[in-house]
Amino acid sequence: MTGGIEIHHLCKAYAGAPAVDGVSLQIAPQELFVIVGESGCGKSTLLRLIAGLEVPDRGTIRLHGEMVAGDGVMVSPEGRGTGFVFQSYALWPHMSVRDNVAFPLEATGMPRRAAAAAAEPHLDTVSLRHLAERKPDALSGGQRQRVALARCLAGGAGTILMDEPLANLDPHLRATMERELLAFHRSSGATTIYITHDQREAMALADRMAVMRNGSFLQVGTPQEVYDRPQSREVAEFIGQGTVVPVQYADHTAQLDGVSFPVEAMAGQAPGAAMAILRPEAIEILAEGDTKGLAGTVRETFYRGGGWERSSSLRADQS
Ligand code: ADP
Ligand code: MG
């Protein structure tokens, strides 16, 4: 593979404690790849290694076919053609929106007026042309993040790394920004790695995603593969909502508390004791005394707007 991002057995420890612990990964050119995991699992360290802000202990990184770290090579951050978008906006406070976006062009030696003119289409992409004269402190959080995105576009980065860029925004704005990020990704043509601790955001944005824990990947796949076919209990419990229950499995049927259910099994699942994930959308509540289903108790309900969330227990749990 010549394009995209190729990572081979990457390791980085701090004072002997592994932060990134044997990550291997291939990302196709122009793919939007999302890494999701709890705080402290090593996501930012992995991005900083790719950006060239950290030196790996072991392993290699290739960006668009070029070895940038490992095997005795360490290309500087400026030499990697990567754009970085952080959770904090990292804009120049004394510069207008336009000048912030033009900055990467000026930094390459383009004259000021030409850089300002070249910034215009990128301001259009993020719908900020009408605010081009403003300073960052006169913008909302979402607008500031859009300036950071436009600046990334202006820099012409072939690789864009985003570290929880929406984490500081309120929920309503986040949904809008998710759509803008997808549009941004498509117009940039860049290979993008996007990091988040929010699995809902990960599934909404990703072409493919990785679930990260303790410095390594538990599973890599499309959002649907990861949701529908979690390869481990950890992934099943982290992605989406649901309950993992012990069942007896045979021939596409699971026995739970004496009741048989048709299930989608993992390829090669052997008959016998197994784990199944119950997803809330797959559960239907029957009338009391109906013997087709499992007996259970609804303990609490939460109104979530448009639907109720139930906290329940199966009878079998209580015996
Ligand atoms: P995440 O972004 O997933 O929250 P990080 O990559 O920031 O996780 O951190 C992974 C682990 O490495 C954490 O235990 C963190 O404390 C540690 N770590 C990160 N950066 C440093 C550093 N510069 N020095 C020492 N420890 C660090
Ligand atoms: Mg982080």
Image (tube, helix red, strand yellow):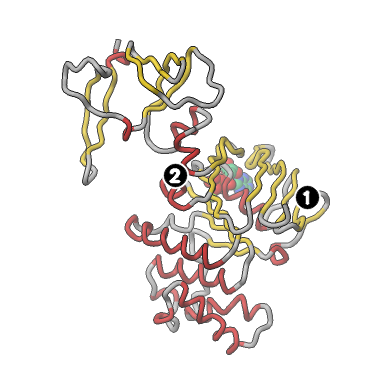
Residue 299 location (% of width, % of height): 22, 26
Instruction: Give the amino acid type for the residue marked by disc 2 in the picture.
Output: Gln
Seen in the picture, residue 318 relative to 50 is either above or below; the reply is above
- Residue under label 2, please give it: 199
| Quadrant (top left, top right, bottom left, bottom right) of the C terminus | top left
In the displayed structure, does residue 59 sit left or right of residue 212?
Answer: right
Q: Secondary structure at mark 1?
A: strand
Amino acid type, mark 1: Gly
The single residue placed furthest to the right in the displayed view is: 72
Dot 2 crowding, Cα within 10 Å, few <14, some 14–19, many 20+: many
Q: Is residue 250 left or right of residue 27?
A: left
- Quadrant for residue 170, please give it: bottom left
Q: Nearer the viewer, residue 315 or 52?
A: 315
- Choose between 146 and 13: the one closer to the eye: 146
Expressed as whole percent of the image width and height from the top left, the position of residue 273 reads 48, 13
**Residue 54: % across, % down:** 68, 53
Residue 278, picture quadrant: top left
Q: Which mark is residue 230?
A: none
Q: CA distance from mark 1 to mark 2?
A: 31 Å
Q: Which label sits on residue 70?
A: 1
Q: Is residue 291 left or right of residue 261?
A: left
Residue count near mark 1 (Cα–Cα under 10 Å), binned few <14, some 14–19, many ≥20: some
Q: Is residue 34 above or below residue 212?
A: below
Q: Nearest to the eye among marks 1 and 2: give it.
A: 2
Residue that appears at 74% across and 57% down: 65
